[in-house]
Amino acid sequence: MPTILEPGQIEAAAGSPPFLHLPPHNLFSLRARRLEQLAEGHPLADYLRLIAGLCRTQQQVLDDPPLADPIDLQRVEVCQQHGLPPFAADTLIREDSWQAYLEAFLQRYIAPEQGAVAEAVTTLRVASPGQLRAWAVALVSGQYSLVPAALVPFLGAALQTAWSHWLLSVPNLQLTPGNSLSQCPACGSPAMAGVIRHRGKHNGLRYLVCSLCACEWHVVRVKCVYCEQSKGLEYLSLEDDRHAANQAPLRAEVCPGCNTYLKLLYLESDADGEALSADLASLLLDMRLAQDGYQRLAPNLLLAPGDE
């Protein structure tokens, strides 16, 4: 039987678990495969398969990255010494090295000849570096209204590829917690979701997954990652034919204190689960929680949120 840590044990063990859990080098292939599995019989099957195709292109670029300016290792070292995110998105997004990854992504992505996808790809291909920078700055800062919705998945995919490549290219990272529990220690971006791991030294521990670089960092369970309180937390899910709501692999940790929620993926209930694909396949849960008045603060860079 897997070991489940109770709240007291979680706090007591908080200083000892490994702080970081870096993504595997085949991250995007794993996401693509999982999205294709989840698409079977899903009401959003076409969208999930579209994103799976983007993930496969991401993996191609990650496996054979463009000849772009390398990450500044001296800056990485200085940031680590001062407890700052070494791949800070709000800084690197303005330096344009990521645009080489966007160009490589668009070159390798096979778009249909017509339709909305073709138009989105063409728009990105002909946009000026300044326009691309403006859209990217808006996207990573959560200003989705400033980015044409059709461009979000493609631009987000390229940005994820660049930051994941930088993250995985620097060995022996020594990162410290960010200014808030939900902030990625590697790039400063907000978490997309949480994963409750189930194997080895990570068993029973919660790791948050970065929306940009896919870095994972440890945060104790049974604590809101936004207001840091534990009182009154609820865990909500949607029942289906395989799982009761309280046993579902994907549940939302809902905080009545700050009226927010964060999705959590329980790998003990779905060993093949993956955070981004699970998030996109559970948008009905977001709709239900929005109807109940709860706010989602966790972005998914492959999804343009609808109007409130």
Image: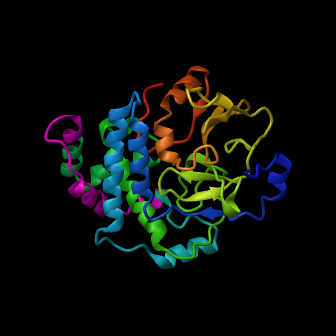
Q: Which residue shows up at 68% across the image and 31% down it?
A: 246
Q: Is residue 258 above or below residue 196?
A: above
Quadrant of the rendered image containing residue 99: bottom left
Q: Is residue 232 visible?
A: yes
Residue found farthest to the top: 291
Which is more toward the observer, 169 or 123? 169
Q: Which residue shows up at 46% across the image and 44% down it?
A: 277
Location of residue 34 in the rendering, given as x and y in whole percent from the top left corner: 44, 46
Q: Is residue 157 above or below residue 306?
A: below
Q: Which residue shows up at 64% across the image and 68% down it?
A: 83
Location of residue 114 in the rendering, given as x and y in whole percent from the top left corner: 14, 37
Location of residue 24 in the rendering, given as x and y in whole percent from the top left corner: 49, 63
Q: Is residue 93 above or below residue 49?
A: below
104 in magenta: yes
Which is more toward the observer, 116 or 13? 13
Location of residue 251 in the rendering, given as x and y in whole percent from the top left corner: 62, 36
Residue 250 horizontal side relative to residue 205, left or right: left
250 in magenta: no
Q: Is residue 136 visible?
A: no
Which is more toward the observer, 201 or 108? 201
Magenta region, residue range: 90-119
